[in-house]
Amino acid sequence: MAFEKEIATRRTFAVIAHPDAGKTTLTEKLLLYGGAIQTAGAVKSNKIKKSTTSDFMEIEKQRGISVATSVMTFYYKDKMVNILDTPGHKDFAEDTYRTLTAVDSVILVIDNAKVVEEQTEKLMEVCRMRDTPVIIFVNKVDRDGVDPFDILDELEQKLNIDVQPLAWPIGMGPHFKGVYNLYDRSLNLFQPGSTKVETENITITDLADKTLDQYLPKEANQLREDVELIEGVYNQFDVQKYLAGQLAPVFFGSAINNFGVKELLDAFIRIAPQPLPRDTNVRKIEPTEDKFSGFVFKIHANIDPNHRNRIAFLRVCSGEFERGRFYNHVRLDKKMRFNNPASFMADSKNIVEEAYAGDVIGLYDSGTFKIGDTITEGENYNFKGMPSFSPEIFKELVNKDPMKTKQLNKGIHQLTDEGVAQLFTQEINNAKIVGTVGELQFEVIQYRLKNEYGASCSFQPVNFYKACWITSQNEEVFNRFLKAKKPYLAKDKDDNYVFLASSEWILKLTREEYPEIEFHFTSEFKNRKKV
Ligand code: G4P
């Protein structure tokens, strides 16, 4: 098939990191290598700085930027590289988790002084749910940091994955001299502040070679010792283990100094997977199948009331997408065609004529899409792997203007379809509980309900700690549970029962009291039996 060749060139991935580790800086440097941008600074950081979390205009500005940088495409060594952007702010973590369902691999950026941070652990958990292959880039080696051997230990222990260095730093901080590439046995010496895209590598196949001492008069012996140790501990790098999500290769460098980035990109191109097969509720879909399929993983609303359109971002999973053809919206069982599918790059927006598995396209939408929706050429199935995670903050939505109840309901349903937050309706009093991962979302919801739907609301704190989706094989026990726990029960938008636990302790006690009830922390669970 003609498009098999197209698909084989795609490398679709995301750069992920705890805020401030250097995700934006690294992404920009990757784009420079790919020729997608010409100067540093062309990609603005899409993160909302901590100090401005309550500045709504700032959020809006960021939202605009994040559309422009949603998918960044460039060609490098005959491969078409698609970088999917993820929001930097932790309150938008759920957006990041969803974007991770649309990639085939990730590059995880670590700050060499902070190593594994809170968000790093969460992001890795999400990667492990799908066995996503991970490459780790330890950034900021131009600054003093944790000893590289200790970094490897911490990564392995806290991220629960085997790691193997493929590049090794020579010194750190003010004594940083460069990186020894363990994969092709070459030396790359550091020149601070270099903006050169091409760096010169010195091949040293035998570290005993005296030329090493010429380049590194003080550090050569330490490097020899380190490499001997590393080679004693690690076997030959096993690409299959990386592709299975069990082994993460580690690179060291300094994104801001454009150092170690080329090694990273070259290794990425060499080992990162092409578009992978994806599971649906019916069967596995191979990217090279001749029928088109894809799913929506992100919806971006234009909040300007004069332009109320939305853009649904669709990951193509198989076959070839063609502009203007009729496709099937599985959930709505509706034929749809898209006349202006778009690709986005920095400030430009282009109409896409065709797209292949691995690509991401933007579809203009007036409210027909929900996160997770599947589009096919006719077959009925739904892509899996789009779970909602238990939110961390819960508040009750209070209607401040009863004349606008209809608008409020419509608004909150549409916003939650977009994935801004999750909505649970309590069994006992039909109260609407909004769950988010960050405080910022409540501001966004309040503002958007007013601005786009003309509805006024406020939020009242409620004392819930976690939302767990519940199932049971035992119908009698399940019904008994529903009766006993009514004040703590709610339904999600798909009518699944959710237990709202007030505290970790209550959750523990409840689980002990009802061993036959299964408590799930994401909305997608295996062997789900609706009772
Ligand atoms: P993020 O997207 O992961 O949140 O991180 P970002 O790239 O914005 O980088 C966070 C900070 O770390 C920035 O400094 C950036 O300049 C710095 N940084 C990135 N890479 C390196 C590196 O290799 N070495 C050193 N020493 N610093 C690095 P900032 O002061 O927060 O912002 P800015 O004013 O420099 O933009």
Image (spheres, grey):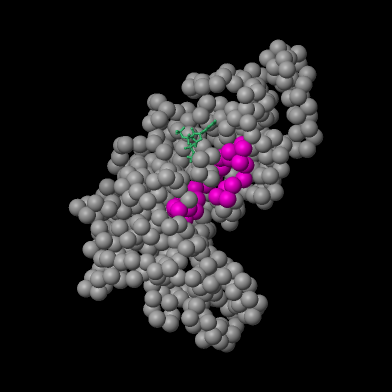
Tell me if residue 213 comes above or below residue 9 in the rendering: above
Q: Tell me the quarter of the image containing the N terminus.
A: top left
Residue 134 or 520: which is nearer the viewer?
A: 520
* Residue sitting at x 53%, y 82%: 485
* Residue sitting at x 43%, y 82%: 428
Give residue 441's position: percent from left, percent from top: 39, 57
Give residue 421's position: percent from left, percent from top: 41, 61
Give residue 64's position: percent from left, percent from top: 32, 44
Please state the extent of the stretch shown in magenta in the rendering: 91-120
> In the drawing, does residue 40 fall left or right of residue 187?
left
* Residue sitting at x 39%, y 76%: 431
Name the quadrant containing residue 515. bottom right
Instruction: State yes or no: residue 98 in magenta.
Output: yes
- Residue 302 appears in the rendering: yes
Give residue 174's position: percent from left, percent from top: 62, 24
Numbered marks: total = 0
